[in-house]
Image (tube, rainbow, N blue to C red):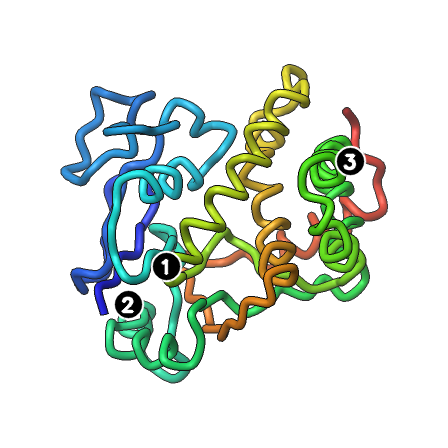
């Protein structure tokens, strides 16, 4: 299999040695003076300058427009697909052989679902970000992609979902997904006023994309397998849990 997994990064870092991993400098157009010694997302047709609002999706767009491969995926410099079992974090990163075994079972590989337990996906989003983001997204689906509304409603009512904008997809599915996703996000960009958003909330199109992946999968009846995710940096779970509960019980200020 010809597999290319884009590894989005904004800084120098250690990357998996397997050649199927392709590190790409995210938002390179905004930092032309910074040379990481890897390709940037600013060549060919690109949206590199939108990186503050699209996050790793500027690398996804670049891959959509530039790459040809049997399977194309997206990971992060500090977050990778992993195999189960022992070993240090780099030893656990999926190898080509292990990934090919998963792709024999289904055309899409996703990270294991996150479960919010006490909140639905909709509730979690509006407690962490701005409700207008989802309201406008739903309007766009209603206006342009009504067949996706049932899956959208089901996904928003669920407490579980695939996060991180991470996946590996067969090329035809990858191209279909990117065409659908970016059409929605560009329409959303035209409708939303994010001028008063914090720098964090201004990453809105990356956040919304995380919630749309399951909508696309459900509507198109795409089969997938899941893999664990390993983090290359220490996770502060106490802080994460406290922030999650704080967002739930303290009203967000606009």
Q: Position of residue 144 (x, y in %)?
A: 68, 37
Q: Earlier in the sequence, mark 2 or mark 1?
A: 2
Image disc number at residue 232: 1
At mark 3, the secondary structure is helix
From the viewer's perspective, is the residue at label 1 or at label 3 nearer?
A: 3
Q: Where, by quadrant of the figure, is residue 238 drawn? A: bottom right
- Which of disc 3 and disc 2 is earlier in sequence? 2
User: How many numbered marks appear?
Assistant: 3
Which quarter of the rendered picture does the N terminus lie within? bottom left
Q: Which residue is mark 2?
A: 90
Residue 108, percent across and down? 45, 67
Secondary structure category for the residue under label 2: helix
Residues 246 and 144: in front is 144
Q: Earlier in the sequence, mark 1 or mark 3?
A: 3
Identify the residue at image location x=39%, y=38%: 61
Query: In the image, is residue 239 above or below residue 20?
Result: above
The circle on residue 70 is: none
Q: Disc 3 marks which residue?
A: 135
Q: In this view of the protein, can residue 117 be seen by the observer?
A: yes
Separation (CA) of disc 2 from disc 3? 40 Å
The Cα–Cα distance between marks 2 and 1, rounded to whole angstroms, is: 8 Å
**For residue 44, what is the image quadrant?**
top left
Q: Check whether the beta carbons of the residues at disc 2 and disc 1 lie within 8 A of each other.
A: yes
Q: Nearer the viewer, residue 101 or 164?
A: 101
Q: CA distance from mark 1 to mark 3?
A: 35 Å
What is the crowding at mark 3: few (fewer than 14 residues within 10 Å), some, or many (at least 20)?
Answer: few
Measuring 34% from the left and 35% from the top, which residue is drawn there? Answer: 26
Residue at x 77% of width, y 24% of height: 254
């Amino acid at each position: 299999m010809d597999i290319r997994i884009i590894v989005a990064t904004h800084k120098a870092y250690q990357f998996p040695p397997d050649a199927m991993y392709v590190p790409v400098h995210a938002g390179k157009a905004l930092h032309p003076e910074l040379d990481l010694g890897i390709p940037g997302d600013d060549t060919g047709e690109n949206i590199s300058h939108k990186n503050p609002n699209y996050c790793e999706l500027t690398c996804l767009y670049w891959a959509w427009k530039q790459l040809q491969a049997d399977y194309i995926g997206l990971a992060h410099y500090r977050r990778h697909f992993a195999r189960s079992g022992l070993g240090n974090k780099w030893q656990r990163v999926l190898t080509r052989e292990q990934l090919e075994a998963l792709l024999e079972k289904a055309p899409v590989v996703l990270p294991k679902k996150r479960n919010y337990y006490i909140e639905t996906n909709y509730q979690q989003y509006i407690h962490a970000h701005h409700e207008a983001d989802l309201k406008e997204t739903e309007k766009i689906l209603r206006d342009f992609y009504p067949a996706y509304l049932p899956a959208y409603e089901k996904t928003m009512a669920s407490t579980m979902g695939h996060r991180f904008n991470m996946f590996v997809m067969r090329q035809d599915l990858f191209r279909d997904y990117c065409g659908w996703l970016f059409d929605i996000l560009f329409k959303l960009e035209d409708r939303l006023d994010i001028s008063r958003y914090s720098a964090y909330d201004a990453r809105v199109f990356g956040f919304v994309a995380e919630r749309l992946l399951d909508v696309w999968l459900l509507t198109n009846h795409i089969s997938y397998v899941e893999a664990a995710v390993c983090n290359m940096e220490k996770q502060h779970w106490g802080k994460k849990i406290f922030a999650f509960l704080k967002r739930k019980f303290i009203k967000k200020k606009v």
